[in-house]
Amino acid sequence: MKTLILNAGSSSIKYKLFEMSNEQVLAEGLVERIGEAVGKIRHIVGDKETLIEEHFADHRVGLDRVANLLVDRNLGVIKSSKEVTKVVHRVVHGGDKFVAPALLNQKVIDAIKENISLAPLHNPPNLLGIEVSLTIFKEAVQIGVFDTAFHQTMDEDAYSYALPKELVAKHKIRRYGFHGTSHSYVAKRSAEILGKDLSKCNLITLHLGNGCSAAAIQRGKSIDTSMGLTPLEGLVMGTRCGDLDPAIPFFLSKEEGISIEEVDKILNKQSGLKGLCGSNDLRDIALKCEKGDSLSRRALDIYVRRIKKYIGSYIAVIGPVDAIVFTAGVGENSAIVREMVCAKLDHLGIEIDKSLNEQKGKSARMVQTVNSKVKILVVPTNEELEMARLSEEI
Ligand code: AMP
């Protein structure tokens, strides 16, 4: 059985084809710059990477090209696109309707459309990918996996904002949380590494990529998370500010004489690490820190302090923690961030082993000292595999 995972963005389509009998990746790639004069596909089969540059007028043309590539005599991995029996789509916002993957019938598609106001940048391209895929992979079962679903186990205490209840009800304003597929994958993987049943694990999972979020996982279920109604809340991210005094947007709008849309752009695209020091890439920032750049050092300190504050607050709500789990681009690769986050937390039973932490590796590993009560794990995330696995459950 072959399962195709699709993640459609505003001008891109990420794809990965799995043979599900052994969870082997047959092909993967990324179509970029859809709608621009010259588009690009990076198509990977095993060790072989092929770069294609041509014009993709829209998502249909882009996905059609992917379907052709998959059956191509030289670059393909299947004989006919009919071999793709399932297409699984990433959908960013499922609102409060979806606690698990869903078969994409008209009712589900309409429900995703209803959530557009909650994720105006993400749900429309996700829907476009679904629409196009339904016409190209006509015989495949089409399934939606929602970034928000894993966090639907949160209690009302955790997901509520202290706003007037009429407005909350009218606009469905609440914390939803995102990166759910990643938190779910690393939580399961952590339980395996700890040799415990997931339903007995208390974890704090830290997805630190360009977007960043933390989740408090109690007995295997998400009971709190740092992102909220939108992915803007919580940790300091690459270009997003995370937590703010809610009065700041009004203050900025008034003092700068700018529209609320402009403020929105500043908070989402020009803030976070980029706003603080000019770069949103932890590799650059770490390098500049080594060279004594004080602006970069300050940005890193602010980034790390926010993570520490979430760890402290999550320990307060979930009780004894089995493990702190680092994942995504920064979490998996940046030893300095892991070291700074765990520094001086020995009073909470968290002690990182400097030399284990500095060892590079692609596989999941433990990096705590022998005395550390809390395990510290580095677990590479695999959102596509988790989507493929979750889609087997319906
Ligand atoms: P992601 O969103 O998970 O793809 O993560 C992307 C981010 O991970 C980049 O913007 C970098 O800040 C960070 N990153 C990737 N590789 C490294 C590395 N080797 N060291 C430090 N940070 C890294």
Image (cartoon, rainbow, N blue to C red):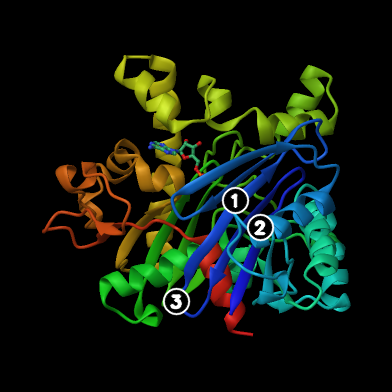
Looking at the image, tell me whether mark 2 or mark 1 is earlier in sequence order.
1
Q: Are marks 2 and 1 in contact (CB under 8 Å)?
A: no
Q: Is residue 118 above or below residue 192?
A: above
- Check the picture and name the quadrant holding the C terminus: bottom right
* Residue 352 in view of the camera: yes
Tag 1: Cα neighbours inside 10 Å, few (<14), some, or many (≥20)?
some
| Residue drawn where x is 17% and y is 58% of the image | 372
Q: Is residue 353 above or below residue 194?
A: above
Looking at the image, tell me whether mark 3 or mark 2 is earlier in sequence order.
3
- The answer for how far apart the CA atoms under marks 3 and 2 are is 23 Å
Amino acid carrying mark 3 in the image: Asn
Front-lying residue, 352 or 53: 53
Secondary structure at numbered mark 2: loop
Query: According to the image, label 3 marks what residue?
Result: 22
Amino acid carrying mark 2 in the image: Asp
Q: Nearer the viewer, mark 2 or mark 1?
A: 2
Looking at the image, tell me whether mark 1 or mark 3 is earlier in sequence order.
3
Counting from the top left corner in percent of width and height, residue 238 is at 55, 35
| Residue drawn where x is 65% and y is 49% of the image | 231
Counting from the top left corner in percent of width and height, residue 70 is at 65, 60
Q: Position of 67 compared to 331: left or right?
A: right
Q: Which mark is residue 29?
A: 1
- The answer for how far apart the CA atoms under marks 1 and 3 are is 20 Å
Q: Position of 313 compared to 394: left or right?
A: left
Q: Position of 302 compared to 157: left or right?
A: left
Secondary structure at numbered mark 1: strand
